[in-house]
Amino acid sequence: MSGYRLTTVETVREEGSWAFTAREGDEDREVFLVPCVDEPDGGAAEEGVDESQPVRAWINRCTHENQRLHREGVGAVTRGGSVVCPKHGSAFDTCEGFCDNGEAAGTELRSIDIEVRDGAVFLTDDDLTYLYEGLPDDDGDDEGPASSSHLTL
């Protein structure tokens, strides 16, 4: 079995999301993990979780604008089984990464290969090399969490 051990499913569930930075070629990539919740209302941590793949990993950028979905100190905003973009309110399914509303409708987050073994989450994506837990300091390339969305977060 291969892969870099990232964290535990329990940690992702307790924190709501968990982020790390990895290298792909010459570029650093921000990645975040979220619990895969099938139920539209989210439910309790144990309800609605796909136990065959209890967490999913996504590149930490909205597909509409280059906005972080997971922010240090805040995490990813999730609601009803979706990750919500803090800028425009587009909601991406936590299990599939697909967005069917808002500015990002019809797009899908880029998934990262992970595997869960005995409650631990491993990075198994051949294109990425783990660098460190957390995200790099904000480089000023996104406009921050100011929202023009009609949704209240």
Image: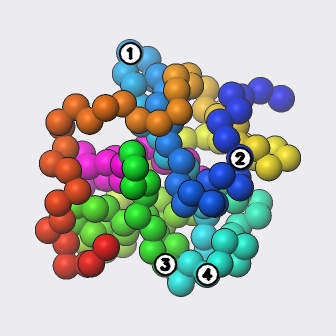
Q: Residue at x 41, y 35 (%)?
A: 135
- The quarter of the image holding the N terminus is top right
Instruction: Answer above or below: position of 130 versus 153.
Output: above
- Give the number of the disc on residue 26: 1
Residue 153 visible in the picture: yes
Instruction: Answer above or below: position of 66 versus 36.
Output: above
Q: Please tell me in which quadrant of the rendered image residue 76 appears.
A: bottom left
Q: Find disc 4 in the rendering and name its residue.
A: 43
Distance (Cα) linking label 4 and label 1: 40 Å
Residue 98 visible in the picture: no
Kind of element beneath mark 3:
loop
Q: Residue at x 56, y 78 (%)?
A: 42
Q: Find disc 2 in the rendering and name its residue.
A: 8
* Residue type at tag 1: Asp
Kind of element beneath mark 1:
loop
Distance (Cα) linking label 4 and label 3: 8 Å
Q: Find disc 3 in the rendering and name its residue.
A: 80
The mark that comes first in sequence, 2 or 4, is 2
Kind of element beneath mark 4:
loop
